[in-house]
Image: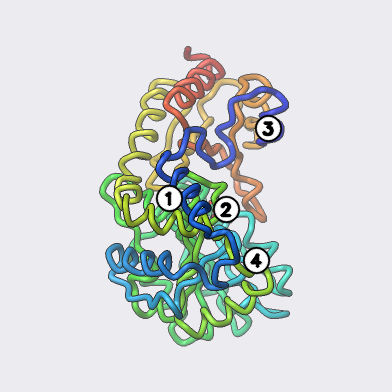
Amino acid sequence: MSRRARELGALNLGQGFPDYAIDPRLTQLVGEAMAAGHNQYAPMEGVVELREGIAAKLEECYGAEADPLSQITITLGATEALFSAIHAIVRAGDEVITFDPAYDSYEPAVTLAGGRCIRIPLQPPRFRFDWDRVRDTLSERTRLVILNSPHNPACTVASPQDVQTLADLIRDRNVTVLSDEVYEHVVFDGRRHISVLSHPELAARSYAVFSFGKTLHATGVRVGYAVAPAALTQELRKVHQFNTFSIAHPFQQAVAVYMREKPEAWRNLSAFFAAKRDRLRAALSGSAFDVPPAEGTYFQLIDFSRVPGTAGASDEAVAERLLTEAGIATIPLSPFYETPPRLTVLRLCIAKKDETLDEAAKKLRTFAGAA
Ligand SMILES: Cc1ncc(COP(=O)(O)O)c(C=O)c1O
């Protein structure tokens, strides 16, 4: 979608990345780190100051006690943390439970490890977990459950009850949890993100995965991390060591200082994106595009069911029309499913300048015939 948006000169609200500048202080800190000589290999596990800062933040956010030396590993974005965790755990013939619509990096990593994803669909319009289905799917072969909350692309947030139910279901099984929490700081309307790290029973058998790319509006910085008990961390590091080995040193140094200097960067993130979400929702109100509730992440779904001329059309067909006729790139959800249900929603990224969001709403209103 990004490539085609570029080719067609379309406004790109498809792929999830900000189109505004990052905080110049972060840029400055990267320069300072290089000038100070942090240009050789960083420790394989990550810069200690950064891991200490992360440990303090985990305690503040989730009451979690993670030892920075034995339980936190800096990775190449969340993507590497997910890959390394999957390869630490999954062996030939193992089954991994994932929830559709699923982030696209999970299944290839599982397949490469010789495992098989059992994909449980979250059904529109609410995309809630079907825990009965999970109970029926768990077997002796299940080795891993991959959870994602706040959820991309459904924009839902797991409830405390969801997290408790997962713990209950796997209590007597040899199952590890991989919890993708990259949108931990983007939850709306007074909600709280429930990390597996805040649930002692789950924390003892989970990898929790995070990303500074999301938190610092800088997806190209590629600094993420995995938090897990020492034994699980040791296994993850065996993969990490011979995969990416060591993450860009000046970036780690810069992020460590930045997080210490500016904790408001993550503390204010929900309010920042709630304003973006509300701006887009307001700009579309009264149009034929409905805007389902968005509980978290930096995405907003739009529902085209009432848009004239789309009756019976697939989400991919409507996304294609929006791209070619309205000049706006969106993301359909059906490619995130193994067996897609009937879907009438498209995903928009709200991590955009206000002007971009206004322009997007204008294009959508014109398409919907309500300009
Ligand atoms: C749910 C989810 N997990 C993981 C990632 C990957 O994060 P990173 O860019 O830090 O590799 C993304 C990025 O879009 C995401 O949306």
Q: Secondary structure at mark 2?
A: loop
Secondary structure, mark 4, is: loop
240 and 361: which is toward the camera: 240
In percent of width and height, residue 300 lies at: 46, 38
Q: Amino acid at mark 4?
A: Thr
Q: Earlier in the sequence, mark 3 or mark 4?
A: 4
Q: Name the mark on residue 166.
A: none
Residue to which mark 1 is pinned: 215
Q: For marks 4 and 1, give the one nearer the viewer.
A: 4
Type of amino acid at the residue the image marks with label 1: Thr
Mark 3: give few (<14), some (14-19) or many (20+) Cα within 10 Å.
few
In x, y percent, where is residue 38?
A: 53, 60
Residue at 54%, 50% in the rendered image: 221
Q: Does residue 106 appear in the picture of this structure? A: yes
Disc 1 secondary structure class: helix
Which image quadrant is residue 196 in?
bottom left
Label 2 vs label 3: CA separation? 18 Å
- Are dots 4 and 1 in contact, CB under 8 Å? no
Q: Earlier in the sequence, mark 4 or mark 1?
A: 1
Indicate which label's residue lies in the foreground, 1 or 2: 1
Please name whichever residue, 176 or 159, is drawn nearer the observer in this view of the structure: 176
The residue positioned 46% from the left and 59% from the top of the image is: 253
**Colour style of the rendered protein structure:** rainbow
Q: What residue would you read off at disc 4?
A: 244
Give amino acid for label 2. Pro
Can you identify the residue that label 2 sits on?
101
Q: Circle 3 sits on which residue?
A: 317
Can residue 167 be seen?
A: no
Estimate the spatial distance between the alpha carbons at disc 4 and disc 1, rounded to whole Å.
22 Å
Tag nearer the camera, 4 or 2 = 4
